[in-house]
Amino acid sequence: MRLLLLRHGQTPSNVHGLLDTASPGPGLTVLGERQAAAVPHALRDRRVDAIAVSPLVRTSLTAAPLARARGIEPLTVPGLQEIEAGDLEMAGEHEAHLSYLGTVFSWARGDVARAMPGGLDGRAFFARYDEAVAKIAARGWESVVVVSHGAAIRTWASARVAGVDVDRVERTTLANTGLVEIEGDLDTGWRLVAWGAHPVGGSGLDAPAADDPTGEPIED
């Protein structure tokens, strides 16, 4: 089975550097809409049996152009949503970003007992994301586009996908509509096929000036 883990398009909170993780969440910016519109062409040669989205509205909006192009009704899967920021919700300071990312990457390295300030711990995050992936895998599809979120994708893949280097992921941006491609199954595990840090529609859809807290590299 192949999973194409696609980060959602740009939101206003990404632009303003806000840790906006609550439901239902913001919509897309004009650039985010362009990023989403580029997905069908970028995946034109790829098999897509199904599209899964998180409960947050930005993933449905990102999936919509691909869903229309393929005639597929996206499946909303609880558990694929962004890692909640807890007491850091809507914080825009760089120190808050470092606290958030430092927490989630500590989970990826095995410190799952550590909790987000005022929020969940790594055990709770991995339990829900693992369950979401298991629900998708149980459908028997061969290739699924999973529209999810920056920190959630980076953290889960770092811990669960062979061939992913957490140190490298921590230092690398995952842009809006960046694509992480994995293959495998629940029995044998998951292996990295490709890690696309830039938008699938090309680097011209990137936003290097944005202070994007869940997709940014950790820099002191």
Image (cartoon, rainbow, N blue to C red):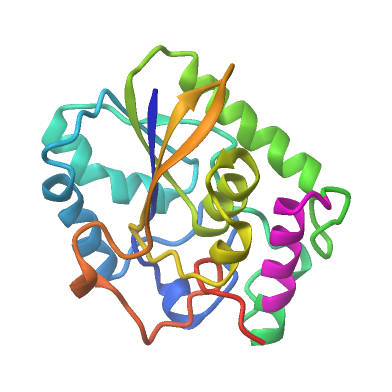
Determine whether 218 is above or below 53 in the image: below
Percent x, y for residue 157? Answer: 56, 46
In reply to whether residue 99 is colored magenta, the answer given is: yes
In which quadrant will I find the C terminus? bottom right
Residue visible at 53% across and 45% down in the picture: 163
Left or right of 104 on screen, residue 30: left
User: For the point 53% across and 20% down, which residue is it?
Assistant: 135
Look at the magenta stretch and give its main secondary structure. Answer: helix
Say how many tags the image has.
0
* Left or right of 38 on screen, residue 173: right
In the rendered image, residue 41, in percent from the top left (x then y), is placed at 11, 48
Q: Residue furthest right?
A: 113
Q: Is residue 49 depicted above or below 83 in this figure? A: above
The quarter of the displayed image where residue 219 is located: bottom right
In this rendering, position of residue 77 left or right of residue 167: left
Quarter of the picture containing the N terminus is top left
> Residue 183: where, in percent of width, then height?
42, 31
**Is residue 95 or residue 54 the one in the foreground?**
95
Across and down, in percent, residue 68 comes to 15, 36
**For this view, does 162 lie left or right of residue 139?**
right
Q: Is residue 137 magenta?
A: no
What is the residue that sits farthest to the front in this orientation?
A: 163
Numbered range of the magenta stretch:
98-111
The residue nearer to you, when weighing 158 against 41, is 158
**Residue at image x 33%, y 19%?**
142
Q: Residue at x 48, y 48 (%)?
A: 56
